[in-house]
Image: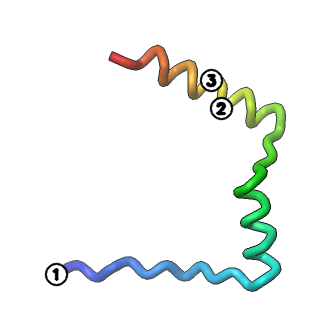
């Protein structure tokens, strides 16, 4: 039988607070926004 995958990521208090703030209000560069728009357009055109 296969072994379960164990995740090794452990955040300390400050890291977990910063991570949660980012998740609540993510920031994107202009290049990142362009990439997201292109991916959304491609997904829309690929629909059946």
* Mark pair 2, 1: CA separation: 39 Å
**Quick one: label 3 or label 1, which is nearer the N terminus?**
1
Rendered position, 8 above or below 18: below
Q: What is the secondary structure assignment of the residue under circle 2?
A: helix
Q: Is disc 3 surrounded by few (<14), some (14 to 19) or many (20+) residues within 10 Å?
A: few
* Quarter location, residue 10: bottom right
Q: Residue at x 77, y 58 (%)?
A: 22
For the C terminus, which image quadrant? top left
In the image, taking residue 36 as reference, residue 19 lies left or right, namely right
Please report contact status of discs 2 and 3: CB closer than 8 Å, yes or no.
Answer: yes
Q: Secondary structure at mark 1?
A: loop
Q: Which residue is mark 2?
A: 36
In the rendering, at what x and y percent does residue 13 appear? Answer: 77, 84
Image quadrant in which the N terminus is located: bottom left
Q: Which residue is tagged 3?
A: 38
Q: Residue at x 49, y 78 (%)?
A: 7
At which x and y percent is residue 44?
48, 19
Instruction: Name the quadrant containing residue 40.
Output: top right
In the picture shown, does residue 17 fall above or below 33? Answer: below
Residue 16 horizontal side relative to residue 42, left or right: right
Few, some or many C-alpha atoms within 10 Å of disc 2 (few <14, some 14-19, many ≥20)?
Answer: few
> x and y percent of residue 19 in the render?
74, 66
Q: Nearer the viewer, residue 44 or 35?
A: 44
Residue holding disc 1 = 1
Label 1, residues with CA under 10 Å away: few <14, some 14-19, many ≥20: few
Does the residue at mark 3 contact the one at mark 1 (Cβ under 8 Å)?
Answer: no
């Amino acid at each position: 039988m296969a072994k379960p995958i164990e995740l090794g990521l452990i955040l300390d208090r400050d890291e977990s607070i910063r991570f949660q703030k980012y998740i609540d209000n993510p920031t994107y560069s202009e290049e990142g926004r362009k990439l997201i728009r292109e991916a959304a357009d491609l997904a829309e055109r690929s629909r059946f």
